Image (tube, rainbow, N blue to C red):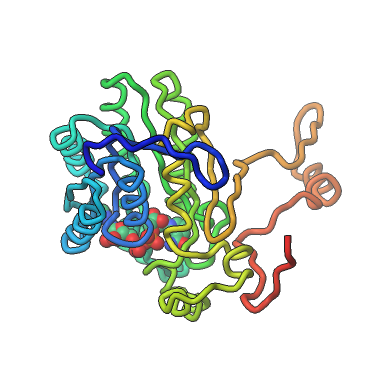
Amino acid sequence: MSGQMKEQGVSEQGSESIELTGKVAIVTGSGQGLGLAYAKALAQAGAKVVVNDVDGAAAERAVKAITEAGGTAVAVVAPVGPTSTADLLVQTAVEEFGRLDVLVANAGVIRDRVLWKMEDADFDVVVATHLRGTFTTVRAAATRLREQGEGGRIVVVGSPAGQHGNFGQTSYAAAKAGVVAMARTWSLELARAQVTVNVVIPTAITAMTATIPVYREVAEAYERGETLPRVVRQEHALGGPEDVAPLVVWLASDRSADVTGQAIGVGGDKLSLYSYSEELAVTYREGGWSAEAIAEAWPTAFAPSAQTSGITLPPLDAGVPAQ
Ligand SMILES: NC(=O)c1ccc[n+]([C@@H]2O[C@H](COP(=O)([O-])OP(=O)(O)OC[C@H]3O[C@@H](n4cnc5c(N)ncnc54)[C@H](O)[C@@H]3O)[C@@H](O)[C@H]2O)c1
């Protein structure tokens, strides 16, 4: 695929196929899981890819898989977080492939503990990888994209935990909510440079989700190649990483040029668009609010709109009505 022009094809649905030939993408944390699926799908669509991971063997395997499938990729083995890694990733894209068009800031770790058992080091590594790693890599990519002056695409990665909160995920929920807040800000700051910034909120069976006890059986069924039940693929939005990758390909392409600042959920059969901190109820009181006036207003003006925290899902054995 490398160096060749792919023909503009027409898909089964009759719409023009999405083409990334000539584009160069960096995908952090792409040695396995979702990042690997993104790197493979971007390469399959014609992009040259800088693979990154802390796990050197996984990164090399990813490059081998992409190259053997006819794509083009190189690996950078380094942890995201430090500015030096972000600079090395952009430098590698430019030195190896001549330019940069797309960054997918995907690398991540979890260190789940309930608040009173969470240690400083666990909190710090999660924030350093997701929040700082996204900040430093996007800053380096944005700097290059502004210099090039031809626009670009930034895709960052949130989580349902960041959107709703999740038991045991203090550091992860905070970091992922922060990623969305940064992306909304960058979509404003980079609009003039025609660089779009969007958030993918994925759900997929990977090493990360396979550790969640309730999903162990589903993960085993997926590994055996079994068809997953509709409640899993639809309401739990759980399938494989390959179900998430098409959203990243579209966001990396010219076809999404007018989409920026969005948080888009995808997984299994489900695609969704998230709101962001809308005011749910508003009341005014001339002269301002006393504590007593708030106590009086709350039950009628606000309580009916109050939202629950956490991710609410049906039991895995529940049926899903046909749509
Ligand atoms: N799997 C899901 O359902 C799900 C849901 C929401 C969000 N996410 C997010 O998607 C991303 C990918 O998750 P996954 O499920 O594929 O996880 P995974 O554990 O399978 O893969 C993560 C990859 O990132 C690498 N990595 C970890 N720290 C790194 C660092 N500092 N620098 C570079 N690479 C690093 C790991 O070695 C691994 O290859 C993460 O940001 C995760 O938080 C996943």
Residue 69 image position (x, y, % from top left): 26, 55
Q: Is residue 154 visible?
A: yes
The residue nearer to you, when weighing 282 against 104, is 104
Residue 106 image position (x, y, % from top left): 36, 50
222 relative position to 120: left or right:
right
Image quarter for ligand 1: bottom left
Tell me the quarter of the picture where residue 143 sits. Answer: top left
Q: Is residue 120 visible?
A: no
Taking the spot 45% from the left edge, 64% from the top edge, the residue there is 240
Residue 188 image position (x, y, % from top left): 48, 26
Q: Quadrant of the N terminus?
A: top left
Taking the spot 81% from the left edge, 31% from the top edge, the residue there is 285
Taking the spot 62% from the left edge, 69% from the top edge, the residue there is 230
299 relative position to 273: left or right:
right
Circle count: 0
Residue 48 image position (x, y, % from top left): 25, 41
The residue nearer to you, when weighing 110 against 306, is 110
The residue nearer to you, when weighing 11 against 142, is 11
In this picture, is 209 found above or below 136?
below
156 relative position to 323: left or right:
left
Taking the spot 20% from the left edge, 61% from the top edge, the residue there is 61
Q: Quadrant of the C terminus?
A: bottom right
In this picture, is 321 found above or below 141?
below
The residue nearer to you, when weighing 206 against 246, is 246
214 relative position to 106: left or right:
right
